[in-house]
Image (cartoon, rainbow, N blue to C red):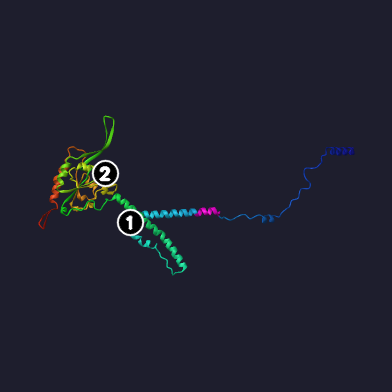
Amino acid sequence: MYRIGRSRLLFYSLKNNRPFCSNVSANPPKEHIFASASLLNDQPPPSTSTSTPPNAIEKNSWSFLKFGLLGALTGAAATAGYATYAYSFEEVDEKTKVFRATGNYDVEDDISTLDKFQALLYSAAMAVPAKAIELYLDLRKSIEEQVRGFTEPSSEKLLPDLHPQEQHVFTLVLDLNETLIYSDWKIVFSCFAKRDRGWRTFKRPGVDAFLEHLAQFYEIVVYSDQQSMYVDPIIERLDTKGCIRYRLSRSATMYQDGKHYRDLSKLNRDPSRILYVSGHALESSLQPENCVSIKSWKLESDDTALVDLIPFLECECKNKNSMAVYGDVEVRFE
């Protein structure tokens, strides 16, 4: 029986041509075994360096340069602002004169190369701030000249010299708006539905008699804070008899604290012989001692302020510091 079973099993295996084997290999492939020391020596050691990439270094350097330039410009601007606020142009020029002279440092020829190099470095280091100060002074001078053209009178002598025979003549300075005239902006509707708008100008009651009478005793000057393109046409229509000798407009005023002031010291006249008449005299003049206040006019039909002022001004001209000449003797009436 044993033989019969064994022969059948062998026949069955040969018939199917299938080798009878196990899935687990009895002889696994051999691998090379390396020592742990060899593995550690072959691998590169871990990097412990904290070095910065070149791009980061370049970026940091450029950022430092930008912040340095920004800080230098900010400091220069702050210094220039403080100098402008605290010192005048002449004071800054005087205080920096010695420092600016150091910018023109001359290098001698008979010194060593090292000394020449140090001298050149010193000259370059001093030349930059010296040139910056000179640029600041030039810029400030130009700006102040431009500002002065708007804030100060156009000339130191707003009126021409008096004739020698008129040295005793008083100067009567008159304001224009609300003193001799009144102007307002008006919109008028006509019956044809057309709209007309513009300035309306009214002449103060008694202004003609006032000008004609006082022109015998005074040199009359109109001094207004309006533009000449507004003043000139009004004076030409107001003064048809030529009683007003001179007219001054906004370019002859002093601009301070947002207002245009009449500076009587620029009239090229004796200050003791100037009277300024205005409805806002103390508010519009820099010399309150020369002011004569009058009620401002705003279209009141019964106004007589100008006519009432005539006797006072005539008496003031005749009695105060009036002079009479008898031969070679000058007599002064006080």
Task: Indicate which label's residue lies in the foreground, 1 or 2.
Answer: 2
Residue 3 counted in the magenta span: no
Q: CA distance from mark 1 to mark 2?
A: 35 Å
Give the percent coordinates (x, y) of residue 294.
19, 44
Q: Is residue 295 visible?
A: no
Q: Which mark is residue 89?
A: 1
Q: Nearer the viewer, residue 289 or 159?
A: 159
- Name which residue lies at 46% across and 53% down: 67
| Region in magenta | 52-61
Q: Residues within 10 Å of mark 1 (few under 14, many from 20)?
A: some
Q: In the figure, is residue 140 to the left or right of 122?
A: left
- Name which residue lies at 39% across and 54% down: 78
- Name which residue lies at 35% across and 54% down: 140
Q: Nearer the viewer, residue 93 or 194?
A: 194
Give the percent coordinates (x, y) of residue 145.
32, 53
Q: Which mark is residue 229?
A: 2
> What type is the residue that disc 2 sits on?
Met
Q: Nearer the viewer, residue 265 or 22?
A: 265
Q: In the figure, is residue 8 to the left or right of 149?
A: right
- Give the mark nearest the N terminus, 1 or 2: 1
